[in-house]
């Protein structure tokens, strides 16, 4: 039985799509057959981050409206075996998704895949609620900043009250993923620390992704940052995937790194 | 066999009752807004029964219409009038509301009474029949109350064993106890119990209210910020002190 994981945040621009792409790629790299679905109908981005925008023929809405089969719409990732992308439609809006349609697609995917990653749109409206409704687990992406933390708190409340699991009396397992973390700015008290965010949200920490130039570079190149294993962000995502699979790992990149002479020479980004 | 379409059942609902005591075209809307602002989420779309039994004097048709309109504008849902005089019956029907008898003891009397005598009678009987307070177990919440969520302990105390986030609201007719940080709004004694109190292990609230009186975050910061504290009503002002 496939595990459905929603990547959500409430606030926009915190790194949901980047994280969805990285985590889906990471799971596939670990040998799990994984599909990542773009729920952001109308603002299709996942295909760009995954570098498959030119291969989109049919999309999620076509499948829901039965204008295409799932196999026609699924795009096989060229870099990572066992990874598939179900792109969103760019020409429709979020009302094109129906609860029954989404359920049917997820049930069909569950037959073939071990992990289904749902990349949620921002906001708390229908589109976001649709993305999280069928989830078994949720990765709540948060920036170390007050408005992002508050929106995450709100979306966790929705997960606990408006998801299928919650309606059946169960709970959606939550993970906190802190992105764009900058230890130097935390040290200068310009940014919330990991401890602050954990204190407010009270959700187990899945990972801390340091702010890194590699993320922007990866997005523009259309290659998930997790493939860039030289970068701290790539390594942090690898750790996060390991923790998602139940492995215990120490959190890295939380402290300000004092760059020694040698390190500066070798360039440690 | 044809499929059964429905089943009739009798049930009891909880509704807010507004005891209308006097009418003023200016004061009524202002006072209602003030009341609703103390707990907007609680009053939002809540069913409302207008009790006219304790109204002083005679309520005119247009006045009742205005009262109902204002209630609807403020987001309440008037569903019925209670204890209205027979003259108002058609106006009530016209407003799409149900007419309920004043209360069990009075129901047979009012239509039979002469019109002038009715209000006098009603005034004297003002103390509503008190139902003996039955034991109501407290409501216990073990998970964090998140931003945007609201928890209301009706007719009892509320115990929250986790954090109340900023933007969350906890309400109780009785006391409120919060064992995690209290960062949202806490409203105790929302039905007017002035003896209700708010207890918390870590006071960081946006607002603390007791029986409609409240203190805001700024004041709380001066008093016992991030400390274990409790709030109670002393006359018309809320006292907050460490525990």
Image (cartoon, rainbow, N blue to C red):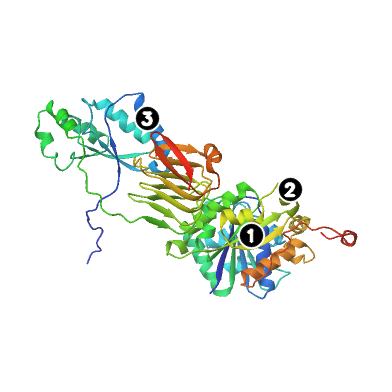
Q: Nearer the viewer, residue A178 or A16?
A: A178
Badge 3: how crowded within 10 Å, few (<14), some, or many (20+)? few
Decide: is B112 above or below A107.
above
Instruction: Give the class, few, some or many, for how many residues have Cα within 10 Å of label 1's Cα (few <14, many ≥20).
Output: many
Label 1 or label 2, whichever lies nearer to me, is 2
| Residue on which the image places disc 3 | B31
**Mark 1, chain letter?**
A
Same chain for the residues at labels 3 and 1, yes or no?
no
Q: Is residue B224 visible?
A: yes
How far is disc 3 from disc 1 in space, using C-alphas?
46 Å
Q: How many marks?
A: 3
On the picture, is B56 further left or further right than B215?
left
Residue A224 sits in quarter: bottom right
Which residue extends farthest front?
A: B243
Foreground residue, A62 or A42?
A42
Q: Secondary structure at mark 2?
A: loop
Q: Residue at x 35, y 25 (%)?
A: B27
Q: Disc 3 sits on a residue from what chain?
A: B
Q: Tell me the quarter of the picture where residue A114 sits.
A: bottom right
Where residue A30 appears, as percent x and y from the top left, is 68, 74
What residue would you read off at disc 1? A177
Residue B170 at what x, y percent from top left? 44, 48
Give the alpha-carbon distance from disc 1 to disc 2, as whole Å. Answer: 22 Å
x and y, in percent, of residue B156 in the image: 34, 51
Q: Which residue position is annotated with label 2?
A: A188
- Point out residue A187 in the picture as x, y percentages from the top left corner: 73, 51
Badge nearest the viewer, 2 or 3: 2
Badge 2 vs badge 3, beta-carbon distance below 8 Å: no
């Amino acid at each position: 039985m496939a595990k459905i994981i929603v990547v959500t945040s409430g606030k926009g621009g915190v790194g949901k799509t980047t994280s969805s792409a990285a985590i889906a790629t990471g799971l596939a790299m670990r040998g799990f057959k994984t599909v990542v679905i773009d729920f952001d109908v109308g603002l299709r981005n996942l295909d760009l981050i995954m570098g498959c925008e030119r291969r989109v023929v049919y999309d999620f809405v076509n499948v829901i409206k039965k204008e295409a089969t799932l196999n026609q719409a699924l795009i096989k990732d060229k870099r990572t075996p066992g990874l598939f992308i179900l792109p969103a439609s760019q020409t429709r809006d979020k009302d094109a998704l129906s609860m029954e349609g989404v359920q049917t697609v997820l049930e069909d995917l569950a037959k073939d895949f071990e992990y289904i990653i749902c990349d949620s749109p921002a906001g708390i409206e229908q589109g976001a609620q649709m993305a999280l409704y069928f989830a078994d687990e949720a990765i709540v992406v948060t920036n170390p900043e007050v408005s992002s933390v508050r929106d995450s708190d709100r979306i966790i409340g929705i997960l606990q009250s408006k998801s299928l699991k919650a309606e059946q009396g169960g709970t959606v397992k939550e993970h906190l993923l802190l992105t764009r973390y900058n230890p130097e700015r935390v040290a200068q008290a310009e940014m919330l620390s990991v401890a602050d965010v954990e204190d407010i949200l009270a959700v187990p920490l899945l990972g801390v992704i340091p702010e890194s130039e590699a993320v922007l570079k990866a997005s523009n190149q259309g290659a998930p940052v997790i493939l860039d294993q030289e970068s701290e962000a790539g390594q942090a995502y690898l750790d996060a995937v390991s923790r998602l699979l139940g492995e215990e790992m120490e959190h890295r990149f939380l402290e300000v790194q004092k760059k020694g002479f040698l390190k500066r020479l070798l360039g440690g980004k | 066999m044809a499929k059964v379409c429905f089943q009739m059942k009798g049930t009891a609902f909880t509704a807010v009752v507004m005891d209308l005591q006097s009418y003023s075209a200016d004061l009524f809307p202002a006072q209602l807004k003030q009341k609703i602002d103390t707990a907007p989420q609680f009053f939002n779309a809540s069913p409302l029964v207008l009790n006219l039994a304790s109204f002083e004097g005679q309520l005119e048709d247009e006045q009742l219409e205005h009262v109902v309109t204002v209630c609807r504008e403020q987001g309440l849902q008037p569903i019925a009038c209670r204890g209205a005089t027979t003259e108002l019956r058609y106006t009530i029907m016209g407003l799409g509301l149900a007419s309920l008898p004043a209360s069990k003891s009075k129901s047979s009397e009012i239509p039979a009474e002469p019109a002038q005598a009715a209000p006098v009678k009603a005034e004297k009987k003002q103390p509503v029949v008190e139902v003996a307070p039955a034991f109501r177990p407290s409501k216990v919440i073990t998970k964090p109350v998140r931003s945007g969520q609201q928890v209301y302990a009706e007719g009892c105390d509320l115990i929250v064993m986790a954090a109340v986030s900023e933007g969350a609201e906890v309400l109780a007719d009785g006391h409120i106890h919060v064992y995690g940080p209290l960062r949202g709004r806490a409203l105790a004694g929302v039905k007017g119990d002035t003896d209700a109190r708010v207890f918390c292990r870590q006071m960081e609230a946006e607002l603390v209210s007791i029986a409609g009186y409240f203190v805001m975050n700024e004041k709380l910061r001066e008093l016992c910020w991030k400390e274990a504290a409790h709030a109670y009503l002393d006359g018309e002002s809320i006292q907050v002190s460490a525990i």
